[in-house]
Image: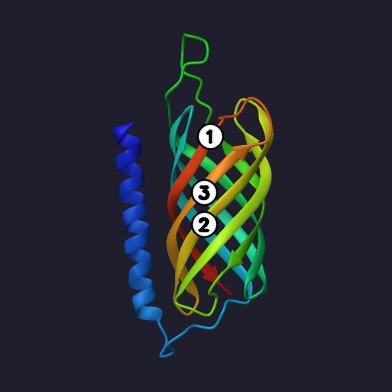
Amino acid sequence: MTEIAAYSRHSASALIAGAVMILAFTGTAQARPPAPEGLELGARLAVQVSDQGTGVIAGVQADWRVMPLVALGVYFDDTPAYAPTRYKCGCLPDPDRPSRLGGFGELHLMPNSRIDPWLRGGLGAVWTNHTSADAELGAGLDFRGSFLALGPFLAHIAPLGSGQPETWWYAGARLSLAF
C-alpha cells in the first residue's frame, strides 16, 4: 500500500511540475486565453479508493469542444497498481483491478479564463472480474495556457451493475492538449 501511495505521489508531482514549467514558457501576452475549439487529447493520473481496495488509475481521453462551454468525448482508464483491502472468499484477495471505457460530457464554466472549472458526467463499461456499466460524476479545474491545460479533479464512480465495488472515488490530476 505504501509503495502505491509513494508511486502515485511521485508521478502526480512530476506531472504537475512538468506542466507548470510548460505553461510558464508557453503563455501568451493575452490576459485571457481563447476558449479551446475542436480536438483535445488528455491524460489523467489518479488515486482510486473503493470499498474493495486502493489503486493508481492511468487514463487517456479525447474530446471535441462542440462549443466553448461543452466538450463531448471518450475515455479509457486502467489500474496498473492495486492493493485489495477485502478478501472475497477467505483465502486470497481478489484483485479487482478495474479497467473502464466510455463516453463523457463536460461543462466548462469559464472557458475563456486561465482557470476554468468544469463538471463532468459519463457512462461506460467497467471490467474487473465482472463486466458491467458505471456512471461517473466529476469536477475539476483546468489551469490553461495557450494550448495546454493542467489541473486537479475529483470523481465519483457509481456502478450500475452487480459485482463491482459499491463506492469508487478518484482524486488526481489531468493534462490536456488542445489542437
- Determine whether label 3 and label 2 are within 8 Å by CB: yes
Q: Residues within 10 Å of mark 2 (few under 14, many from 20)?
A: some
> From the image, which quarter does the N terminus lie in?
top left
What's the residue at 63%, 53% (across, down)? 121
Residue designated by label 3: 155
Q: In front: 39, or 168?
A: 168
Residue designated by label 1: 167
Quarter holding residue 72: bottom right
Q: Amino acid at mark 3?
A: Ala
Q: Residue furthest bottom?
A: 29
Quarter holding residue 7: top left
Of mark 1 and mark 2, the one earlier in the sequence is: 2
When the figure is inspected, residue 73 is found, relative to residue 135, above or below; the finding is below
> From the image, which quarter does the C terminus lie in?
bottom right
Q: Position of residue 153 (x, y in %)?
A: 46, 55
Q: Which disc is residue 10 wearing? A: none
Q: Residue furthest front?
A: 109
Q: Secondary structure at mark 2?
A: strand
Tell me: 3 left or right of 98.
left
